[in-house]
Amino acid sequence: MNKTQLIENLSQKTSLCFSKCENLLSSLERLIFDALKKGEEVRLTKLGRFYVKSLPARELKNPKTGRSFFLSERKLVAFKISQKLKKSII
């Protein structure tokens, strides 16, 4: 399901027009992005949680050339699925 299909389904289930559902989804995306930028965790009880994970700096080696290089510390957005969702899928 892509974003347009999600908005259409949301519109049908809530009896709201397509544009209002589109604005709602865009606002939700912005709220999640802003919270993650601040380093906050976003928990959606039945879905899961989004959080920022830090990966430490490390030295890597190119297997083809054997040349090593340094990868600096970086941050990733991670998602952990809730138990309710996991049970409903399995």
Image (cartoon, helix red, strand yellow):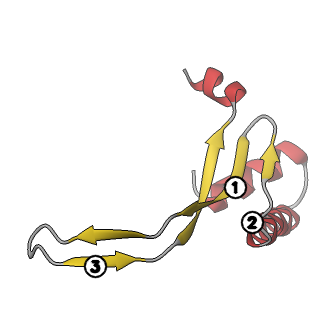
- According to the image, label 2 marks what residue? 36
Label count reads 3
Mark 3 element type: strand
CB atoms of marks 2 and 1 within 8 Å: yes
Q: Which amino acid does label 1 sit on?
A: Tyr
Task: Check residue 51 in the rendering and tell me which mark sits there, or answer none.
Answer: 1
Residue 80 lies in what quarter of the image? top right
**Which residue is painted at 88% across and 65% down in the image?**
20
Residue 1 % position (x, y): 57, 50
Residue 23 % position (x, y): 84, 69
CB atoms of marks 3 and 2 within 8 Å: no
- According to the image, label 3 marks what residue? 69
**Which residue is painted at 71% across and 25% down in the image?**
84
Looking at marks 2 and 1 on the same chain, the residue that comes earlier in the sequence is marked by 2
CB atoms of marks 1 and 3 within 8 Å: no
Within-10-Å neighbours for mark 2: few <14, some 14–19, many 20+: some
Name the residue at the left extreme: 65
Spatial separation of the CA atoms under disc 2 and disc 1: 7 Å
**Which residue is painted at 73% across and 48% down in the image?**
9
Task: State the quadrant of the C terminus.
Answer: top right
